[in-house]
Amino acid sequence: MTAKRFFETTLQAERIDELGGSGAWPNRLLDDQITKWSAERSSEPVITDRFGTMTWGEFGAEVDAASKGLLEIGVRPGVIVQLQLPNWRHFVVAAMACDRIGAVVNPVAPIFRHNEVTVMSELGRPLVVITADSYRGFGLAQMHAELRERCEWVSELVVVPGPSVNTTDSLEDESWLPADAMTWEDLIEEGRFSSYDRSAVNLCRPGPNDVCEMMFTSGTTGMPKGVMHTHNILSVAVDAFVNTVCEGLEPHPGSGAPQAYVCHMASTLGHQTGYLYGMRLPLHIGGHVVFQDVWDPVEFVGLIEKHRIQLSMGATPFLADVLNVGNLADHDLSSWQRFLCAGAAIPRPMLERALELLPACTVLPGWGMTECGLLTVGRPSDPLERRLTDGRAVDDNEVRVVDEAGDPVIDAEGDLQCRGSALFAGYMAGREFTSQHWPDGWFDTGDRAIMNADGYIAIAGRSKDLVIRGGENVPVKEVEDVLLRHPAVGVVAIVAKPHERLGEIGCAFVQPAGDAPSLAELTDFLESQNVTRQFWPEELVIVDEFPMTPSGKIQKYRLRERLD
């Protein structure tokens, strides 16, 4: 019952003593808040999603059943449970059930396909996978059933039926369910009639410095890195958001709801933005979160009016889409008071339009990454010029910009580094690999930035090979490696091209091996290789040769200059 998988972290005793003893780490568990709010706000809403609205009382009961159900199928403290689900209540229930029994959640975005999920599974080796029957026309459950032939460490596949099959008749014949899989309701029933009582569940209670989340992020090599977080670190991320973005925010007087805030999230719960600020934040404050599993700005505007949404967060394209909704003036959007815009700097014209069209909503900038959550953010009291930056560091954390010699610089571009209570517990690859990015107490983010004398930063670019498309990190190396298998591709380099709505798109520079391929031929090939659609390049440039360094490396910055 109490055996734990070993996670090699960077949490030496001195770091725990320093941050825990100073109060920078709050030494609490989110599960205690869930128990509190489920009792005190039993009849109030906690989640609204594609399936309707769930109350705190219903949520508490479902978490209780799911935690016992996971124990029944073999989950124990330290065991990894992979969640590849849309923004549905089942994701939240499963994640919080894992929190309760000390398991480690591995969130995976539902857009990922065979290639990406296989690599993640091989690295994380989850015992249980919980997924949807399908998402946006793609059979997620069938994909995972196929992957089990290679991923023998997965002992149970739990499938959540979507709204289209969630009827009595469909559930009785279960024709939608892959062989050797169990349904979500099977898992809940296991828990409802479990031999484990709450005292047995409490034996699995984790400590605040135990690893509770392992999320993969792509780096310069294109290989995913397993980023480990503890309960304490995730609590810091939530507290920092409340103390900055939510400063001065009060429940809308017309909402009729006593909970602290009504939140919204359309970014996937499978990424750190959604996981932290669409799930853990509203649960901590006892709020109500409204999910969208597919982004639709017109629908979002209606949801603001219907549910009196106050707070949302997303990448720049989300804000651009809302501002382009044609009948904004016909809706009462007075409850919407905060939008945290991260993933790319807010263009001045967009911010000025937001001030005009959304006078009640304060748009704030932010910068962060999987390794540290939201680390710099603008404040509601900041003037417009400061909101055109990427913000300044949250409490108990620092950022600095250093030159090539490693010396801090002001008002000059350099490498962005950070340290403090929000930083992750290490990469799953081990302490030696982690130390390569974190050599002297300052974590090297891989981003380039300029910092002014007041501590506000402006991201100037990235030293790592990523394209950030609509807030989504594209693993460039991985896509390049697949394209190199195409017979018409001799050499390929993918770089970011600025895009008005998405921030960036991928542009593939190709030196052909014979006849030049078309973009359609390359994307058809990527589809046949099961590469995630959002990772496909959207423009193609054919070249005779590449600009190279003396050591033979492609000078990607020179390719990017051709696109400016």
Image: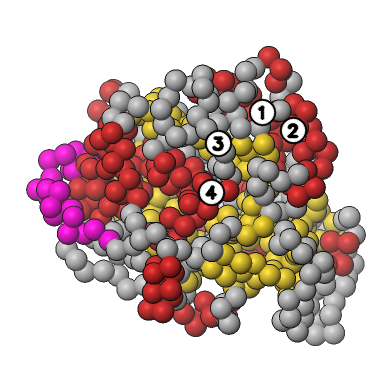
Answer with left or right where residue 349 lies relative to residue 445: right
Residue 202 position in % (x across, y down): 18, 55
Q: Is residue 9 visible?
A: no
Q: Which residue is mark 4?
A: 243
Answer with left or right where residue 196 lies relative to residue 142: left
Residue 486 is inside the magenta segment: no
Mark positioned earlier in the residue sequence (2 or 1): 2
Q: Which residue is mark 3?
A: 249
The range drawn in magenta is 180-206
Per the model, the C-alpha gap separating discs 4 and 1 is 20 Å
What residue is drawn where x is 49% and y is 83%? 432
What residue is drawn where x is 43% and y is 68%? 22
Per the model, the C-alpha gap separating discs 4 and 2 is 23 Å
* Scheme by which the image is coloured: secondary structure
Q: Give the numbered dot on residue 360.
A: 1
Circle 3: element type: loop
442 or 190, nearer to the observer: 442
Q: Quadrant of the N terminus?
A: bottom left
Per the model, the C-alpha gap separating discs 3 and 2 is 18 Å
Q: Is residue 99 visible?
A: yes
Label 1 neighbourhood size at 10 Å, few (<14), some (14-19), many (20+)? some
Per the model, the C-alpha gap separating discs 3 and 4 is 10 Å
Mark positioned earlier in the residue sequence (1 or 3): 3
Tell me which corner region of the image, top left, top right, bottom left or bottom right, holds residue 393: bottom right
Tell me which corner region of the image, top left, top right, bottom left or bottom right, holds residue 232: bottom left
Q: Quadrant of the C terminus?
A: bottom right
Q: Give the numbered dot on residue 354.
A: 2
